[in-house]
Image (cartoon, rainbow, N blue to C red):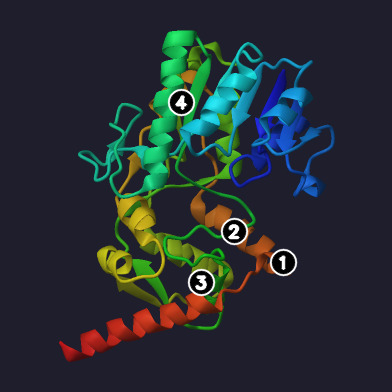
């Protein structure tokens, strides 16, 4: 199989890249070259900015592919560019959408690919919906061979997945835990969530590549494990070897009174209970099973971050914000 990834080194895609290289796939990456030191042996780099359409067209002029996948498209204009570049040059085009595009709030917490797409809280999700609509139009009217993939909260070894964190990532929350400081959990922590390790995501994704039955389809790829946010934070604290000190704060309060964009990320996504039905994926990829429980996967993530100081990006501004919010909550409780 000859495949081309736009991106290929991010949280979702890096495990796919690694596995395909190990399997002997002829894999090309269009990449600006920022993370080339992490590329597996055998992967062919087409160095360039995907926004430079003329340059990319020159790079792929003599190439055709079995699969092209865009991991970094967020707006319809980017998909229109992809269509111009790859029409007639690939047997399958895979777009990575988002499970946050599903109906919010949900009419049924059990999510299938038939769940309506609607998210009034988050422009990111609405843009993903618009991207899907454009690709479906190109499939129906022009025969462009699309597959839409909808991941949910997927994590790797480089960042701790959380509900509430600052602009510089999640390390500051882990640092607070290590220092014995309280951390914020949105809501009462009992809403249901799904965390998917990127190696598990890779199994489903690779099974869709070159799969004739996936053409024209939208497919979600997640773990079957459902956990609460309290369980998620407990597992992180356990992996760090500390006792969790949690302060629960209403998601609406965090979204309304914050300099951080929690309206989209919480009200439009993580504050809602979700349970994914992966029956469609398992019909298309019969041997798919997510085998990494969150409490196991997060131990590997934490161990890797603790071993690599460059991944420990501090965020003093967010730390101070947490202190202010927690202090305000405690003062409010005392006044009741």
**Circle 2 SS class:** loop
Spatial distance from mark 4 to mark 1, Cα to Cα?
Answer: 36 Å
Give me the residue at 67% from left, 64% from top.
Answer: 311
Give me the residue at 27% from left, 69% from top.
Answer: 253
**Mark 2 residue crowding within 10 angstroms, few (<14) / some (14–19) / many (20+):** some
Q: Quadrant of the N terminus?
A: top right
Is residue 9 visible in the rendered image? The answer is yes
As drawn, which residue projects farthest toward the right?
41
Tell which of 178 and 62 is nearer to you.
62
Q: Quadrant of the C terminus?
A: bottom left
Mark 3 or mark 4: which comes first in sequence? Answer: 3
Spatial distance from mark 2 to mark 3, Cα to Cα?
Answer: 11 Å
**Circle 4 SS class:** helix
Give me the residue at 48% from left, 30% from top.
Answer: 149
Q: Position of residue 200 (x, y in %)?
A: 56, 39
**Mark 1 residue crowding within 10 angstroms, few (<14) / some (14–19) / many (20+):** few
Q: Nearer the viewer, mark 4 or mark 1?
A: 1
**Circle 3 SS class:** helix
**Mark 3 residue crowding within 10 angstroms, few (<14) / some (14–19) / many (20+):** many
Residue under circle 2? 159
Mark 4 or mark 1: which comes first in sequence? Answer: 4
Residue under circle 4? 281
Spatial distance from mark 4 to mark 2, Cα to Cα?
Answer: 26 Å
Residue under circle 1? 310
Residue under circle 3? 173
Mark 4 or mark 2: which comes first in sequence? Answer: 2
């Amino acid at each position: 199989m000859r495949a081309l990834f736009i991106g290929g080194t991010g949280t979702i895609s890096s495990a796919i890249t690694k596995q395909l290289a190990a399997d002997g796939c002829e894999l090309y990456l269009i990449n600006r070259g920022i993370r080339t030191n992490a590329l597996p042996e055998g992967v062919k780099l087409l160095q360039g900015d995907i926004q430079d359409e003329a340059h990319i067209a020159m790079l792929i002029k003599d190439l055709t592919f079995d699969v092209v996948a865009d991991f970094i498209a967020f707006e319809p204009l980017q998909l229109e560019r992809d269509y111009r570049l790859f029409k007639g040059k690939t047997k399958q085009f895979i777009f990575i959408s988002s499970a946050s595009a599903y109906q919010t709030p949900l009419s049924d917490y059990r999510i299938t690919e038939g769940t309506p797409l609607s998210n009034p809280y988050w422009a990111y999700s609405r843009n993903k919906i618009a991207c899907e609509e454009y690709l479906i139009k190109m499939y129906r009217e022009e025969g462009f061979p699309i597959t839409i993939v909808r991941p949910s909260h997927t994590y790797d070894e480089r960042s701790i997945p959380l509900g509430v964190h600052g602009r510089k990532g999640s390390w500051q929350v882990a640092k607070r835990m290590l220092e014995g400081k309280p951390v914020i959990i949105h809501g009462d922590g009992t809403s249901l969530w799904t965390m998917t390790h990127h190696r598990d995501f890779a199994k489903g994704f690779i099974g869709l590549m070159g799969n004739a039955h996936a053409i024209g389809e939208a497919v979600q790829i997640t773990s079957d494990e459902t956990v609460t946010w309290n369980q998620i934070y407990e597992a992180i604290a356990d992996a760090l070897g500390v006792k969790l000190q949690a302060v629960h704060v209403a998601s609406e309060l965090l979204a309304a009174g914050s300099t951080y964009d929690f309206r989209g990320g919480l009200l439009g996504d993580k504050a809602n209970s979700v349970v994914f039905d992966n029956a469609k994926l398992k019909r298309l990829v019969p041997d798919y099973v997510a085998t990494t429980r969150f409490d196991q996967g997060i131990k590997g993530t934490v161990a890797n971050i603790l071993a690599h100081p460059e991944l420990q990006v501090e965020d003093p501004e967010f730390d101070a914000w947490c202190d202010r919010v927690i202090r305000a909550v405690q003062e409010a409780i005392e006044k009741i």
